[in-house]
Image (spheres, rainbow, N blue to C red):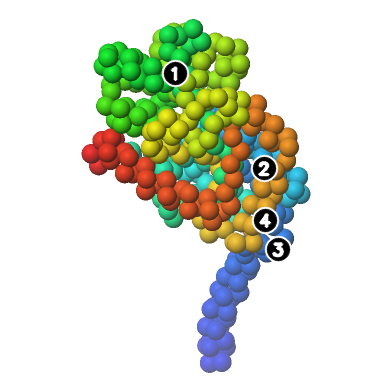
Amino acid sequence: MKRPQWRRHAAKLMIPLCLGFGLALTSHGNAAEDPGKFPSKPITLIINFAPGSVTDLTGRKLADLAGKVLGQPIVAENKLGGAGVMGLASVAKAAPDGYTLGTVTYSQTVIVPHLRSVPYDVKKDFSWIMDYLEMGQTFCVLGDARWKTFKEFIEEARRKPGALTYATNGPRSGQHIVMEQIALAENVKLSHVPTAGGTEVVTQLLGGHVDAALAGAVGVHIRSGKVRPLAVAGQKRLEMIPNVPTFRELGYQIECPLWMGLLGPSGLDPLVLRKIHDAFKKAFDDPSFKELLTSLVMTPDYHDPESFRNLVMTDFAAQKRILDRLGFTKTQ
């Protein structure tokens, strides 16, 4: 027996209505959280370097302090690989809800993308939260070395092309690029000895395997007298060695971005970004964080989201020019 005409029409109408209702439920279930209620659960901070590194120590300290401000824990998670690149890739792919953030240094954003392909677009894939320190890098020799000034070191390098060696934390690293700029400016040949990281740089220097090193983790050795600092790569002198000049003060017009900061995936709601920034800014201003930076021989340095983004974009363009000049870029 056939159904009445009106029942057949009603059945046809019910199909799209049911589908629409189901979609509405699905949409409601996946709806973004009200920014005013953020955060309602723990936040993950992806730290893109190993436990015990400067990135790890400072990132964890900021996370602990900022979590107390936000009223939700910020859980640090180390994600290694690709000299910091894999951690950033995880942030870039995360949902833009504020619950996945990451640490970042200049290397993965303004240097590495010019050297090889990376799984993110620096200009499009991130929300910039703030930077919080400048990584003091010191050009050092052993405490009993014959060089008392950087000028003396360069003068010997000029007399003996390629004879003097220096270590950095890797090929095409920020430290390596700084030294190549100086060698180019002085028209001297220095022999670069790349290592697997900052700890090995110091080991190479203390063991007498290299003549010099450009490194960050040398504060304790400077205090003990085992190491003699000759120059500083950075915008200003380091507080613990105020008598040691910067490379700029010595007349070298070099570009050496050495910042470290925090970011999130692109598309963060402005209110959520502001809440995150404000919490981390309070953490940055906490005396205990400043004490940590002093112990690590790092310099506090702060830019808000907009000025941090401008800094990154400026350094991105500048490093491209420098790497082109040095013949390091991936297109060469």
The amino acid marked with disc number 4 is: Lys
Mark 2 Cα within 10 Å, few/some/many (few <14, many 20+)? many
Query: Which of pointers 1 and 4 lies earlier in the amino acid sequence?
Result: 1
Residue indicated by mark 2: 284
The amino acid marked with disc number 1 is: Thr
Residues at marks 1 and 2 touching, judged by CB atoms closer than 8 Å: no
Of all residues, the one furthest to the bottom in this rendering is: 5
Mark 1 Cα within 10 Å, few/some/many (few <14, many 20+)? some
Q: Is residue 130 left or right of residue 170?
A: right
The amino acid marked with disc number 2 is: Phe
Secondary element type, mark 4: helix
Query: Which of pointers 1 and 2 lies earlier in the amino acid sequence?
Result: 1
Of all residues, the one furthest to the left in this rendering is: 332
Residue indicated by mark 4: 275
Query: Which of pointers 4 and 3 lies earlier in the amino acid sequence?
Result: 3
Secondary element type, mark 2: helix
Residue indicated by mark 3: 36
Residue 136 at x, y percent in the picture = 53, 30
Q: Is residue 234 above or below residue 241?
A: below
Q: Which mark is residue 149?
A: 1
Q: Is residue 181 above or below residue 305?
A: above
Query: Which of pointers 2 and 3 lies earlier in the amino acid sequence?
Result: 3
The amino acid marked with disc number 3 is: Gly
Residue 201 at x, y percent in the picture = 46, 19
Residue 110 at x, y percent in the picture = 41, 43
